[in-house]
Amino acid sequence: MTSHLEQRSARRRTLGMLFAAAVAGALPGAASAQSAKVVRIGYQKYGTLTLLKGRGTLEKRLAAKGVTVKWTEFPAGPVLLEGLNVGSIDFGTVGEAPPIFAQAAGANLVYVGNEPPSPGSEAIVVPKGSTIRTLADLKGKKIALNKGSNVHYLLVRALEKAGIDYKDVQTVFLPPADARASFERGAVDAWVIWDPFLAAAEKQLGARVLADGTGLVSNHQFYLAARPYAEAQPEIVRIVIEELAKVDEWGSKNIRDVTAILAAQTGLESSIVELAAQRYSYGVKPVTPEVIREQQKIADVFAKLKLIPKPIVVKDAQLAFKL
C-alpha cells in the first residue's frame, strides 16, 4: 500500500516534471536551442560541475566564442534528466542509475564522459542508536532512497549480498531533503544516500554507515547531453568536458581550496564538504566499452526487477562519433 510519504513524493515528482516542461515551453524550441549561443547546464549540490561553476573557468573559455553559460540546480539525478529530456537544459551530471531509468522512459540523451569509480561516496546509513548491525538485519525494514538514483542500485546489490529479496524490504521513495527528515524522526529504519548528504548525515546526525559501495558498486558519475544538442554543438560539449578535466586535475591536488569553493557554492559546513571531497574520485574520462558494459549490467538487473518498464541497450545512448 502506498504510504502518505510516497504519495507526497510522487506529487513532488509530478510537479517537478510539470515545472521542467513549463521551463522548456518558455525557452526556444529544440532546433533553436541547438544553434543558440548558450549552453544550459544542470548540476546537483555537489561534484565537479559545482566546482567548475565556482571557479568560473568555463565562462571565460566560452566567452571567446560568444557563448554564455546558464546554470540550473537540481535536487537529484532523475529530475535533472527530466529537464534534459524536455529541453530545459543541454548538459548535466548524474550517477549510474538515472540514465538507465531515463533511457527506458524514452529520453533522447547521450553519454559524453564519466568520473572514475567512487564507491565510498554513497552508503546505507542507520541512526546512531539503531539495533541494525548487518545488512541481513535490513530484512523487513523501511528504507528511504531516491528512486532511480545511483543509490537505488547500491541497495539492490547490498540486499543481494545479504541474501535478501528486494521485495522483502519496504522501500520509501523520497528526495534527499524529505528522506533526511524521515530519517531524523525515525519514520524509516535506514537511508541510502550519496555525498554531500551522506557526509552531512554523518557529521550532523551521527548516522552510522552500515555499508558503503565498496565491493558492491562502482558508483560512476556520468556527464550526459541531450542528443540533438551534442550532435549540433559537439565543439561546445567537448570544451565543457575539457574544462571539467582541468578542474578535476586541479581539485585532486587542492582539497582545501575545493572545500572552500564547494562550501561557498552549497552553503554546507566546511567539515561536511571536506569529508565528501576527500572520498570523491577526480578525473573525467571518455566513456569506455567497459563502463558501458557495467551500465548494461545495471540495466539488466533493473529490468529483471521490473524497476524499469522494458529492457534497454545502453550503447544506443552513445554518440556515433568522438568529441
Image (spheres, grey):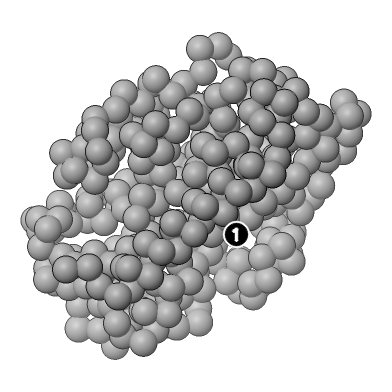
Identify which residue is drawn at 61% across, 66% down: 274
Between 52 and 73, the one nearer to me in the picture: 73
Q: Position of residue 141 (x, y in %)?
A: 17, 73
Q: Secondary structure at mark 1?
A: loop
Q: Which quadrant of the rendered structure holds the N terminus?
A: bottom left
Q: Position of residue 260 (x, y in %)?
A: 73, 64
Q: Which quadrant of the rendered structure holds the C terminus?
A: top right
Q: Residue 24, relative to residue 256: is it above or below?
A: above
In the displayed structure, does residue 273 sit left or right of residue 295? Answer: right
Q: Position of residue 248 (x, y in %)?
A: 65, 42
Identify which residue is drawn at 57% across, 71% down: 272
Between 90 and 190, the one nearer to me in the picture: 90
The amino acid at mark 1 is Lys
In the displayed structure, does residue 131 sit left or right of residue 209? Answer: left
Identify which residue is drawn at 21% across, 37% down: 303
Q: Position of residue 69 (x, y in %)?
A: 78, 41
The quadrant holding residue 208 is: bottom left
Between 215 and 58, the one nearer to me in the picture: 58
The residue indicated by pointer 1 is: 45
